[in-house]
Image: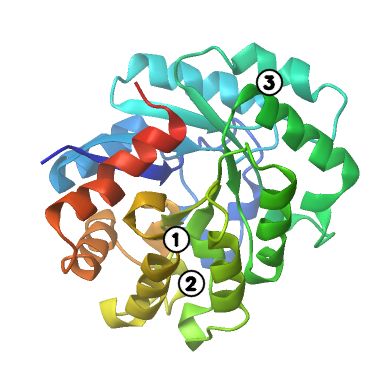
Amino acid sequence: MLPTIDAHQHFWELGRFDTSWLETPEHAPIHSSFLPSDLKPLLDEAGIGSSIFVQTQHNVEENRWVLGLAEANDWLAGVVGWVDLASEDCEAQLLEFRDHPKFVGVRHITQDEPDDDFIIRPEVLRGLRVLERHRVPFDLLFYVKHLRHAATLARQLPDLPMVLDHLAKPEIKHQNFQPWRDDLREASRFPNIHCKLSGMVTEAAWNGWTVEDLRPYVDTALECFGPQRLMYGSDWPVCLLAGTYGEVHAALRTLLEQLSPSEQEQIFHHTAREFYGLS
């Protein structure tokens, strides 16, 4: 069996960048530094061969820092960084990183933008066209209220590979399905949209979620995207708010055990490798 790729994890170091979002009582369990030396034993224990870092900062300095970590850790297979999509400097920023062999994508924390329509603003679409021109994938960090924009982006940017992080954060705790299900199905009609099976436990009841709470959401994603456009992500260390690394990984394995070995390999290896162009 091919080694699993964790397509969504983070690092941060207190005092290096802005981590003020961690300074709330609910985030106390993860108000600490999390570095490669903390993640590697967890990957080894779960039998996972490599991972992909995904940005946490709207700051190109984070790109430089984590690319340095990737150079020092062979198992860190890719870095999804950040460039200022709305800036005239977007392309110049991208060109600094584009040719680094481990710079594999870009993300913006769209979910935190005050404007729910931020991602379809003209100046942001201009930046996304820069990514499209250079074939640099884009991670869509949406809440359900933003998911309707995925189809709009796919129509306007048909050659930009995009992936929905965390299934666009459905309301698993309350077992709500609409409008999430309809908007996910509409997004999945476009072949350049993919989806990460990640971030689910923190959308469920942190202290009492079960595998069965997650099942209808995973089943919907399978129905919409099929294994060819789904990939596994732990969302470590954010997942620690609701479960250990091993619990998150084991839950998804259980939810996908009815799939054939080749379909499971697609989700746990091939999709991430192909989407992000991993060597």
Task: Find residue 212 and report its horizontal and vertical position in percent.
Answer: 29, 82
Say if residue 233 shows up in the picture: no
The amino acid type, in three-letter code, at marker 1 is: Gly
Residue mark closest to the camera, 3 vs 1: 3
Q: Residue at x 63, y 80 (%)?
A: 179
Name the residue tied to disc 3: 94
Give whichever of 218, 89 is nearer the camera: 218
Question: Where does the image place residue 130, in percent across and percent down from the top left?
Answer: 74, 27
Measured Cα–Cα span from mark 3 to mark 2: 32 Å
Q: Residue furthest left?
A: 1
- Of residue 189 and residue 82, the one placed in the foreground of this image is 189
Marks 3/1: CA–CA distance: 27 Å
Label 1 close to label 2 by CB (< 8 Å): yes
Q: Where 177 sits versus 94, above or below?
A: below
Q: Secondary structure at mark 1?
A: loop
Q: Are marks 3 and 2 in contact (CB under 8 Å)?
A: no
Q: Amino acid at mark 3?
A: Leu
- Of the two numbered discs 3 and 2 on the same chain, state the one appearing first in sequence: 3
Q: Which residue is mark 2?
A: 203
Which label number is shown at residue 231? none
Query: Is residue 113 something that shows in the picture?
Result: yes
